[in-house]
Amino acid sequence: MRGRGGGVGGSRRQQQQQQQQQSWLTTLVDSLFSFVRLAEFEILFVVFFLVAFLIFKDLTSRPEYNQILVKKPGGHEGWPFG
């Protein structure tokens, strides 16, 4: 009875034997890829905010853009619309 464990990957025993034969590097890469597949949205979320922060930091470090954020138009000391 060859097809008892059937399916594409074979029986569980065959999978365990194959996994034992894999090198530690293959196991590490497989687990890393499975983690990236699992946490893809969270990784992209963090990368988006990191890029946005770096762009904003770069813009505010330039003196001409920094003056826009610091100086008040017309030299008003208080809130001009109050």
Image: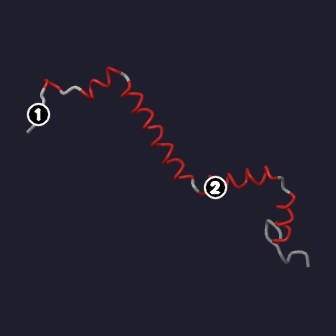
- Left or right, residue 63 beside residue 16: left
Which mark is on residue 80?
1
21 and 2: which is toward the camera: 21
Which mark is on residue 14?
none
Dot 1 or dot 2, earlier in sequence: 2
Residue at image coords 79%, 70%: 7
Mark 2 belongs to which amino acid?
Phe
Mark 1 belongs to which amino acid?
Pro
Q: Position of residue 8 (x, y in %)?
A: 79, 66
Please give the residue where the numbered disc 2 appears in the rendered image. 35
Q: How many marks?
A: 2
Helix, strand, or loop for circle 2?
A: helix
Rendered view: 16 above or below 39 = below
**Quarter of the image with the C terminus in it:** top left
Helix, strand, or loop for circle 1?
A: loop
- Left or right, residue 53 beside residue 28: left
